[in-house]
Image: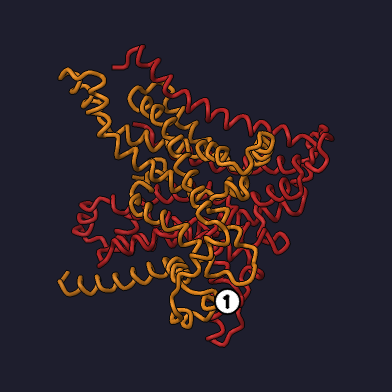
Chain colours: A orange, B red
Amino acid sequence: MSRKTTQTRRTVVTIAAWSIGFLIFFPILWTILMSFKSEGDAIKAPLAMLTSPWSLESYHEVQERSNYALHFWNSVVLSVGSTIAALIIAVPAAWSMAFVPGKRTKDLLMWMLSTKMMPAVGVLVPMYLLFRDFGLLDSRAGLVAVLTLINLPIVVWMLYTYFKEIPGEILEAARMDGASLRAEILYVLTPMAVPGIASTMLLNIILAWNEAFWTLQLTTSKAAPLTQFIASYSSPEGLFYAKLSAASTMAIAPILILGWFSQKQLVRGLTFGAVK
Amino acid sequence: MATAHSRTAARLMVSPAVILLFLWMIVPLGMTIWFSFLRYNLLTPGNESFAGFDNYYYFLTNAAFWQALTNTLTLVLGVLAITVIGGVLLALLLDQPFWGQGVVRVMVIAPFFVMPTVSALVWKNMFMNPVNGMFAHIAKTLGLQPFDFLAHAPLASIILIVAWSWLPFSTLILLTALQSLDREQQEAAEMDGASPLARFWYLTVPHLTRSITVVVLIQTIFLLSVFAEILVTTNGGPGNASTNIPYLVYAQSLLSFDVGGGSAGGIVAVILANIVAIFLMRMIGKNLET
């Protein structure tokens, strides 16, 4: 192949890839642009909207009218809280399954995975009634517990696949060199496990932040995270495009940024290690 | 290295996860099964009585159930078709060398990180709204009548929204798979005179089959439970035109307060999901042989 044809080919692929990428990203870009317009300008025809003056008015209004900060904070508490809780339970479990596997380890892993297959509606009624009877409806504590449990299987699996990659020989070598158990864990295992734990944590925060079944069913206002707060914009009440855009932009921005860091781990986490 | 002592310790370390997941699995599901055999309405508490299979009978013979089942399958198959075909094409494109790969990759993956309520409302208002949406503006510019997507093609519109959210997932997984393709094998085939089409068909396709299966199975699990997108766009309507099984169960149990009927519907949803789950588990289980 001559140099010229590869250059032409590269140019064509570049144009095609950028066009399609832009098209896919466009709804997000449009939402971000619209969030910096006034309500009156936001519903104008696309070109008129683009050329209208920019303003931060919608961001102010979203906070003033509906205490946006509270819902944002709820999202942070729910996603980070459930992730930490899941890690505390999952790290020892994944650790022992990876380093001291028994005859039943594989069955146990598969069984954990199977709990993830249960559709949420299958347990909607009892969960709703239990939450009502224990006074947990619209409480952050109740929701943290549910989110911890629904993501626990993924966390155990991801950690397991990471821990599994730490070679056992390194531990033996450390032991031969006379390292104590404490030194072994602190200086040999931990540094090798930290990247895996960090990416598991990242992916789980993303999943919990975007979870939109239990958060919609079990919260109304006080403990409502952003998923539920944004859903309240589904009832039309006059002009709200710019405010919806501002609320949406702030809701997705942190996750878009975290997501960029976790691209590679995403594949592994969501396919339970089946694709790496 | 595994002594009896370390085995006991290992078991202790696994047990919290196992016990919690076991309780999470068994308690609510057991309650759903129990409720599904009761005549139980939240509006008349204290009047619960045993109903046998009545709830299942009414749920399964209700016309709404069959429509919801059809809608659920249409939604799953429609989104799968778009995301798998689109994902393969997009992954093949992005696997070529071009300028700005990192940026394009980020733009393509972005929709996956948008929470369902945001993506559904952005599409509903900013794009599909028959008065102020972008599609309406484009139609008017071209001198056409704006189309009310969510009123006249509710299920197709929801399929489009959900497919937009899931296209990045299939693309990313297939791209990862393509990048692990054996380059030397490709080059050897090229040297032996295999045409690009033959190389694609005999080398790339078999390599991708496994990843496509994983994509299909995992997406099916999630797509069988689509809920938020329907709640904020159409509320299952008009009529039952965009009601799927999760939405029907929600409407029956929390909007009509029919705990018994809703629970029976929940069990039907569990059975449906399990049929898919069995295949997925086999796939992943095979991969675990190490």
* Residue beneath disc 1: B132
**Image location of residue B229, percent across then percent down:** 58, 57
Q: Is residue B179 above or below residue A182?
A: below
Q: Residue at x 53, y 86 (%)?
A: B142
The quarter of the picture where the N terminus of chain B appears is top left
| Quadrant position of the C terminus of chain B in the picture | top left
Apparent side of residue B105 relative to residue B248 in the rendered image (left or right): left
Question: Which of B15/B270 is in front?
Answer: B15
Q: Residue B203: percent from the left, percent from the top?
A: 31, 54
Give the residue displayed 39% in from the left and 38% down from the top.
A158
- In this view of the protein, can residue B84 be seen by the observer? no
Q: What is the quadrant of residue B155 in the picture?
A: bottom right
Query: Disc 1 residue type?
Result: Asn
* Residue B122 at x, y percent in the picture: 53, 65
The chain identifier of the residue carrying mark 1 reads B
Regarding residue A158, the answer to whether it shows in the image is: yes
Residue at image point 69% right, 47% down? B249
The location of residue B204, given as percent across then percent down, is: 33, 55
Q: Is residue A75 left or right of residue B42?
A: left
Could you say which is closer to the camera, residue A134 or residue B99?
A: A134
